[in-house]
Image: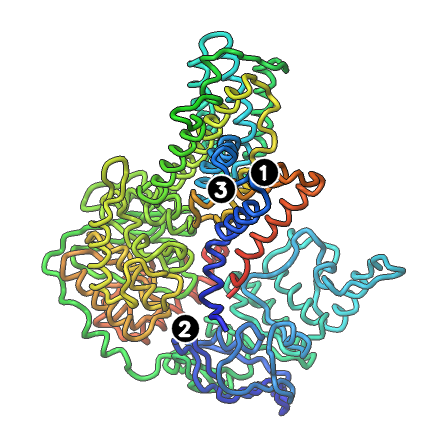
Amino acid sequence: MIDRHKVTPFLRDYAVLIMLAGLLATLTLLSDNFFTYRNLLNILNQNAPLAIMACGMTLVIIGGGFDLSVGATFAVSGVCAAWVGLHIDPFLGLAIAPLVGLMLGLVNGLLITWLNVHSFLATIATSLVFKGTAIVISDGRLIPVRIDDFTWLGRGKIGGVFIAVIVLAVFAVALSLFLTRTTYGRRIFAVGGNEEAAVLSGIRTKRVRIMTFAIAGLTAGVAAAISVSRISMGQATAGTGLELQAIAAVILGGTSIFGGAGAVWRSLAGVFLLALINNGFNILNADPFYRDLTTGVVILGAIGISASGKSR
Amino acid sequence: MTVNSDTCVRLRGIGKSFSGVSVLRDVNLDIAVGEIHGLVGENGAGKSTLGKIIGGHYAYDTGRMHVFGSPAENWTPPQALSKGVVTMHQELQLVPELTVAQNVFLGMERNRFSVLANDENERLASILERTGLQVDGRARVSSLSIADRQKIEILRAIARDARVIVMDEPTSSLAADEIQRLHETMLNLRRNGRTVIYVSHYLDNILEVSDRVTVLRDGDLVATRPSAGTTRQDLVSEMLGGSRDTTIHSLRPPEPDRDVTQLEVRSLSSPNGTTNVSLRVGRGEIVGLVGLVGSGRSEIVRAIVGADAATEGTVLVRGKQYRRRSPARSTALGMVLMPEDRRNQGLVLAMPVRSNLTLPHLARFSGLFGRIRNRSERRQSRRTIDLFDVKPRQIDGDIATYSGGNQQKVLLGKWLLRNPSIVILDEPSRGVDVGARRRIHEAIGELSKNGASVLLISSELEEALGLAHRAYLVSGGTVVGEIDPAAEPVDKVLQALFEIRAASKSGAPQHAGALQ
């Protein structure tokens, strides 16, 4: 008999990696086209915007919050980028998206801390406000930007690697280090783990929470820039549902929904677990009717493993 | 005497410990049917624990309990309820938006043709008639006073055919006239052949209404005696027992040489219940804040460090006025507060020991771009762990799995890591074993010798008075007196505290709800 007390925590901590490895192995066995440089890089590239947003969302959730407005932030940043890119300057357009995202994230953080409301409520409201703003800015129309100086970010490659993947790598590493190696990251863990203790320890918890939402907004803006550049089109309806995908990936990765524990790599693993399921359906030509069902079952499985043995 | 010879609750050799600390030992007690039985004792003597064991909220570790003659097995609140034992909690558990009658019969509504019969008012009327209690069944609970809400809890217990009702500190938020009404209700219950177990700090209240009273001290049952003919002085001396405080007195560091004021508070008031508090703490001085549970001591120190907002008054640190107070600024000024509740206010259980230790001092370990200077942080953590003899000794140990005593050492180490000049300790040795307690007392002594000012809150009078050079008496959120602990015997002080509380109860009602 294997010692359950040692195995269960291991399973719980690394559930997402085990499932990811299992899925990789299965798909490799089932299809010759799966485990190729091309296919894997494509998966990374396609999911780079979502993965960048999931990195930002990780910080919010570890800090004890939720951001349901990143999809709308994505939309506003996207239409701003397209509008500026079309009417003023393509480079400025791409640069403005992260700034817009950062500003909207700041607005979220300030509202939540000033009004002292749960971030869940505040960001439901701001997501509608942002979405409406995106519609107003775009006048309800598509904004096509077919300029090479605009589309390089989403489509270009450096040394055979998509620029989007490089941006993702930079954000993943930077936010990982930020979270684990800096005093700011330590404070995020403390605020999410026990806010009262953090306050009494002299931590300015409001600033910490504002910071996490600002970073989440920034990542949504960067994701929007990549995405708009890739499809060379700004539209107010883009990004719908992205916030839920990002949250699902973070939780699937094993970051605590209650805050105080988690990691950036977990969210990346969560994103790619979901992406692989999708990709598997494509390359196996499986019946797409089963796609949502399979995804849901995988998420349930991951939640089940991480919940097992938690009640001591 | 209406005490019946039948026994409803029989306890034999009951013992209970929490994480290795024994809080009740070998308790033998027979509670008779139809009596009002008082349970008294100092803070931490185990009276509340005993009440909770009878009500099924805590499982006892050793001994046997019989209820109405049958053994109490799997004794949980629902099981207790089915045998007729109900606990009335300090925090009332009512649905504010429902009416009195709906609350009384919550969960036992009757249906007529599968829809609610809505006959709660009639059912309540019959209970009211039977018991002689008075309350408007159609009133919304949210519109009622706390005393009336307690009555609803009692009615609810009766509706479930409770024969034994455990009341844990039922008067702590009541004004004097409301206490009278509660006592009438208790007598009423007794007339109806029901038993009341009355746990309280208020000795006069207990003596006024109970038939017998049991005194607990440090987890031991000291005496059970008829209330008639017993005085408050008798109870106080039994609660304190012999002189067991001599060992602590020797711990008190020598009087500080110079009387330089480091912390001064002038007429501080706060919405948290702190009213017009003035006090001062000198260099190297240990000053006790002494009061009963609920007297507002923790609230006073929270207002001092800025954890709770203050409306009036000033705080001076080393002679300079300290405005716009916040825990962050206090920490920067070298004034730290070690909170009373280590799990909810002190430690971040999801983080390792090291991160907990350095949490208030992160700025000190911050390098370029906020990078944590790992080596320095580890070295400092190692030093603190060694200094306080934290076990296990790992720097990155999982604090959630540590014993209470070691968690408390980490908490203390966290606050003393940077040699603060003003240290406020709220219940520093609550729920820890003897060894950890000794180490904590030594640390407090060292603080004083090194010139730090210490403000000490402890519910154990022997601890506060044994360590302190000077002490303030606290009641109702304000300082009501100052004593020299070396000159005053502990039982005198306790007696004085009970008298102060009794006086404030019979006078203007305190807004005690804010003090909880």
Relative side of B286 to B226, left or right: left
For the residues labelled 3 and 2, the Cα–Cα distance comes to 33 Å
Residue type at tag 3: Gly
Residue B342, compared with residue B324, is above or below; it is below
For the residues labelled 1 and 3, the Cα–Cα distance comes to 31 Å
Residue drawn 65% across the image and 86% down it: B68
Q: Residue A279 carries which label?
A: 1
**Percent position of residue B256, x then y:** 13, 61
**Percent position of residue B299, x then y:** 39, 54
Residue A208 visible at all:
yes
Residue B240, compared with residue A197, is above or below; it is below
Residue type at tag 2: Ser
Circle 2 chain: B
Residue B444 visible at all:
no
Q: Which mark is residue A65?
A: 3
**Residue linked to disc 2:** B19
Element assignment for label 1: helix
Q: Residue B126 carries which label?
A: none
